Image: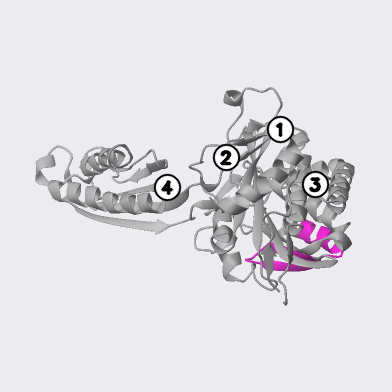
Amino acid sequence: MKYLLLLTAFTTLGLSSSGQDLKQQIDKKAQALEEQVINWRRDIHQYPELSNREFKTAEKVAEHLKSLGIAVTTEVAHTGVVGVLQGGQPGPVVALRADMDALPVTERVDISFASKAIGEYNGEEVGVMHACGHDTHVAILMGVAQVLSEMKDDLSGTVKFIFQPAEEGAPEGEEGGAELMVEEGVLKAPDVDVIFGLHINSKTEVNTIGYRPEGTMAGVDNLEIKIKGAQTHGAYPWAGVDPIVTASQIVMGLQTIVSRNLEIIKAPAVVTIGKIDGGVRSNIIPEEVTMIGTIRSLHPTMQRVIHRRIREIAINIGESAGAEVEVNIRKGYPVTYNDPELTAQMIGTLQDVAGEDNVFLRYPVTGAEDFSFFAQEVPGFFFFLGGMPAGMNPEEAAPHHTPDFFIDDSGLMLGVRSLSRLTVDYMNQYEPEMGK
């Protein structure tokens, strides 16, 4: 059954009496769960698992959902867990997503539940840490599942809880993450109408929410450039073709793409070379050099320009030096795109939950998120939840993906209330199509 949006029937300032009652139920149930949600988060933080290896985390999630009477499917895209909660009344299907994986980072934070875990990443032994806050996302969505399951008779629709593995990227040689979940049909049976997701932020104060319509996080492409010269003695560079000097010129040339070829008032972009590999000793000019890097963009036209100019610059610089250059660009995550109509429709809910002064329009982020694969298929809204201790200077807060990354637990309940209210308020804006 399909549903029509009642564009004028609902605002957060004009909730029906039943809507007000659901709001009060959510707040009351969420408050009662605060200690449990924090305990879940700390347990998951203490025992993190890398991408496609989230076995214990998935087991914990599945057991919780089953205890709530939610229909559960496991081993989706390797270790993913999907729960389906059927409401008491007909309505749309709302998906809520949380990512579960940790990072190959050794924790330095002095907390009682710090990770001591060791794992294997691409053949190397590494420390493992929830250095991007995915532990908070899992705990929040577990809390939302409990809140909504306890009021399922009052829900006008179906909720699909998506606990996703491998957001940080599948291990080398494996598939995973949101892209694989979509391929396996996670947005089907029942067919999802919209999807909501959040991300904790270590540099935004607790009890605040940041959002942006349209492109909110960058699309990411992976770049590899191979430069083949002619090997020679380091004392006689004229006898060969130096791929290291050529690589250096290419790096500098690539920096002109953003500064000189893009209309950067439209959207930001980044071209970064992260590794140059070539040579074995000081007095040998090697035959070949390989460079790898990342491309970030928030606009599809700009993305195409970047790809074209990388090839033109690298190949032409190589030819001028007498070297052969091969450019390979592999697409990673698309732009994380917030449907503008859905975003405008739901901002009132976030303002009502957090307080209007605590919800702000933020700048786009050149980091990437594979929530983008879900939002390519159905309208999506992805927002940022504050996790920095109140009053702290953001410049002093450790960034994501670092050993000192820290999240204040006191902000988790705003996440539970926000996702719960977005679900209920969205459902309450719909009614069955006439005659269907």
Residue at position x 21%, y 40% in the image:
245
Q: Earlier in the sequence, mark 2 or mark 1?
A: 1
Residue 92 is situated, as x and y percent measured from the top left of the image, at: 72, 65
Q: Earlier in the sequence, mark 1 or mark 3?
A: 3
- The residue type indicated by label 4 comes to Ser
The reply to whether the magenta stretch includes residue 75 is yes
| Span highlighted in magenta in the image | 59-85
Which quadrant is the N terminus positioned in? bottom right
Residue 290 is situated, as x and y percent measured from the top left of the image, at: 31, 50
Above or below, comparing residue 131 to residue 287 in the picture: above
* Label 1 secondary element: loop
Above or below, comparing residue 196 to residue 269 in the picture: below
CB atoms of marks 3 and 4 within 8 Å: no
The reply to whether the magenta stretch includes residue 390 is no
Separation of marks 2 and 1 at Cα, in angstroms:
19 Å
Q: Disc 4 or disc 2, which is closer to the eye?
A: 4
**Residue that badge 4 annotates:** 297
Q: Few, some or many C-alpha atoms within 10 Å of disc 2 (few <14, some 14-19, many ≥20)?
A: some
Which quadrant is the C terminus positioned in? bottom right
* Label 2 secondary element: loop
CB atoms of marks 4 and 2 within 8 Å: no
- The residue type indicated by label 1 comes to Val
**Residue that badge 3 annotates:** 40
**Residue that badge 2 annotates:** 401
Q: Earlier in the sequence, mark 3 or mark 2?
A: 3
Residue at position x 65%, y 60% in the image:
194
**Residue that badge 1 annotates:** 206
